[in-house]
Image (cartoon, rainbow, N blue to C red):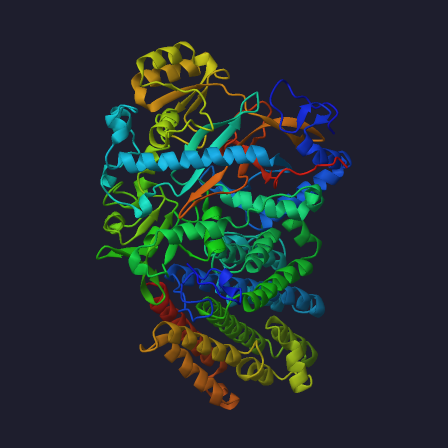
Amino acid sequence: MIPADTTGISAVTSFDGKGIFGPRAARPMLSRDADSMYWMSRYIERAEHVARLLLVNGNLLIDVGDLAPALQEQQWLSIIQILRLNESDEALSGDAPMGIRVARHMTFNAANPSSLISCVSRARENARSIRENISAEMWETLNSLYWSIRGDDARSRFEDSPEDFYRSIMAGSMLFQGLTDQTLAHDQRWLFTQVAKHLERIDVTCRVIETKFIILKGAETILETALRNIHWMAVLRSCCSIEAFRRHHLGEMDPLRVAAFLILERNFPRSIRFSVERAVDAVAAIHASVDPNAVDPAERVLGRLNAQLEYAEMTEILNEGLPAYLQRIQASVAEAALAVQKAYFLN
Amino acid sequence: MFANYEVDGLFDEMFVQPGQPRAHYAPVASRLATLDVEAFNRRRRMADVTFRNQGITFTVYKDQAGVEKIFPFDLIPRIIPANEWDHIERGLVQRITALNLFCQDIYHEQRILRDRVIPADLIYGAKSFRREMFHVNVPRNIYIHICGSDLIRARDGQYMVLEDNGRTPSGVSYVLENRTVMKRVFPALFGAYRVRAIEDYPLNLLQVLRSVAPPHAAGDPSIAILTPGVFNSAYFEHSFLARQMGVALVEGPDLVVENSFVYMRTTAGLRRVDVIYRRVDDDFLDPLCFRPDSVLGVAGLMNAYRTGNLAVINAVGTGVADDKAIYPFVPDMIRFYLAQEPILPNVPTYICARDDDRKYVLENLDKLVVKSTNESGGYGMLMGHQATQAERDEFAEKIKADHRNFIAQPVVELSQHPSLCDDHFEGRRIDLRPYILYGEKITVMPGGLTRVALRKGSLVVNSSQGGGSKDTWVLEDEQELAAT
């Protein structure tokens, strides 16, 4: 069937009959698979944020001691607020200190959709239904992470050292995302994970800044400067940004600078602007590979937000009010997520 | 650890008698002799963790919640010498050839019925006979492209066919994964052997799928595996094969039929599908043709199939060839279509639809294994010699009520193979399911799935009934095996 030649290359059977080196059209992707790809990526990103918030908050309260019990409670509840969970949930009641109740609720309570165990399980369930779309390395990493939180020894490891436990989840997420970048072709499959990751990151970061800003604003009068700085450092840590911020601003812990850094810094991968730019790029690339002629609503929404962040100034944002500004960004993210869903998952 | 090992008058794969291994097992036996229990258990744990982390699991349902389980892996490999395998391979090629000629004949001229080799009522009474397939031409006239025939060994070591699986045989993913894990945890065992590679199975399967593509696909067919979904117990395998071949894995709701073509819903709209390797039973493929309540398939699929716009593997209607009441006639099929004597014999079988046979079965229930002709996976069986009188009476009533639905076989002692039990080795019964592919040519995967009945004395090896599996080595041509 294959003509003999002298190179020996023809011994390799070419499936398409057009020759081994000919171009191949991009393989289509099932809508259901795109959907699962997207949610796998969002849930693992969410798990990482939850783990980091719990870790940072625990350490923060060790640092500030029992100076302000009311503020402590508020700090723990802020995690519940950031994730838009019900503060009067029965699972949160009990006699144990607030920190322990929140940590339990957010770590092992499978009935809580934002708990670590829920996020990791959902990421893994999505991955399990699309294993033929992801790499073996990605699957094994996610599956091992799942068993590390689901296995028999998970609770005792957690009791031994919550910090190590949370760190292992953050590291698992980072490893997974790194493998996603390094083992997957950067085609539609990868692009959907990128859209999801960045939309999730924008969303959580907005909520962290918004919630903490309101709490710290309210506590301004009772906090000494030194303590206030510690709290703002914790906000940066919650967004994985403390070192980058220090390098940038030489350690001046001014709340506005913190907010400006987390929202507008162009080159830092944890800032809102950075993520918006990446999300636009990914959505545009998906759109181009699928149907270059149609108008993509998600691209429009995110593109507009991107342009806005590009030219934004902190004074403007403060005039509008920081919380209102952040809420507007979240609304755009929700709109974009819905548009992606409509355009690609419901075919 | 072999101190109290017993052979018990069975055929033992490893030992001629205790302390005297067969030549092809000698290197393994001497290697195992140098290991203590802890060293062995360490490897077993390593294998278990590997299986778990790779998600090589199947789902067992109880109390609504599905529990993911590892298919128990038995670390000692089963070894088949080259000459034995040669015999098995020739027998399997002969068998799949005859089974395919039979399907072609049954859905067209029915010569075998007209010549009264097989009673026509047995065919028409088979639940798996699909009249929808009558006079439908399938690509290359092949129906069973993928076959898994279960082999057992009698007391004298002779290989016999226990049943053929010509619908959607499963387990091949475990064969491939067992080998991978074995290499990882016990590389030293391979040292003395030249074991035939099996890794090309997915490639061979892909070639089979390509070989049936309709002409309009023009050399670049769009191929998909159809799975019932992530909750199916064999989902791991469906996903594994899709991954190994790089083809799409679709569920019924991903598909839609328009103008007798099948399409899948993609991010870029509908895309045509040319070949479907379905892991869904005939009954669920198309609610317009078969079960109207099924959501696992897609309405209109049969129309696309019969029009020739879509190829389906295995063909619809192959169940008629692996019906347990048809099985006793496979040797006759081989004689009828190929004018050859069967290379691999059947296990003697009594057909309850025949008056003489039924009379014998009812009188000898305590010596027989009775099987329902339409069940698989070890369900609907009576092990007469182990059952209580009440269970036997109940089965006798069932047989009297529905002759067609039952066959019976004498209890065949399976061969045994050493397995680690706690801290020593004991013999456990095993069988063998080789996988045969039929596309442009017939390819038999060297080896197959060796299933182990992990409970002492048990003859049931099905995974749903507490069976495990082991890596199966077919050796390259005769080689000198020096006991080290």
Q: Nearer the viewer, residue A264 or B89?
A: B89
Q: Quadrant of residue B356?
A: top left
Is residue B115 found left or right of B421 in the rendered image?
left
Image position, residue B350 (x, y; %): 39, 18
Quarter of the image where the C terminus of chain B is located: top right
Count of labels shown? 0
Q: Nearer the viewer, residue A52 or B269?
A: B269
Q: Nearer the viewer, residue B29 or B268?
A: B29
Image position, residue B435 (x, y; %): 48, 40
Q: Quick check: A18 above or below B116?
A: below
Q: Quadrant of residue B78?
A: top right
Q: Nearer the viewer, residue A85 or A64?
A: A85
Q: Quick check: B95 above or below A280?
A: above
Q: Quick check: A118 above or below A245?
A: above
Image position, residue B266 (x, y; %): 35, 63
Image position, residue A168 (x, y; %): 65, 60
Query: In this orientation, does residue A94 appear?
Result: yes
Identify the residue at image location x=53%, y=38%: B449
Is residue B419 found left or right of A259 in the rendered image?
right
Is residue B20 found left or right of B99 in the rendered image?
right
Query: In this orientation, does residue A152 appear?
Result: no
Quarter of the image where the N terminus of chain B is located: top right
Identify the residue at image location x=39%, y=13%: B361
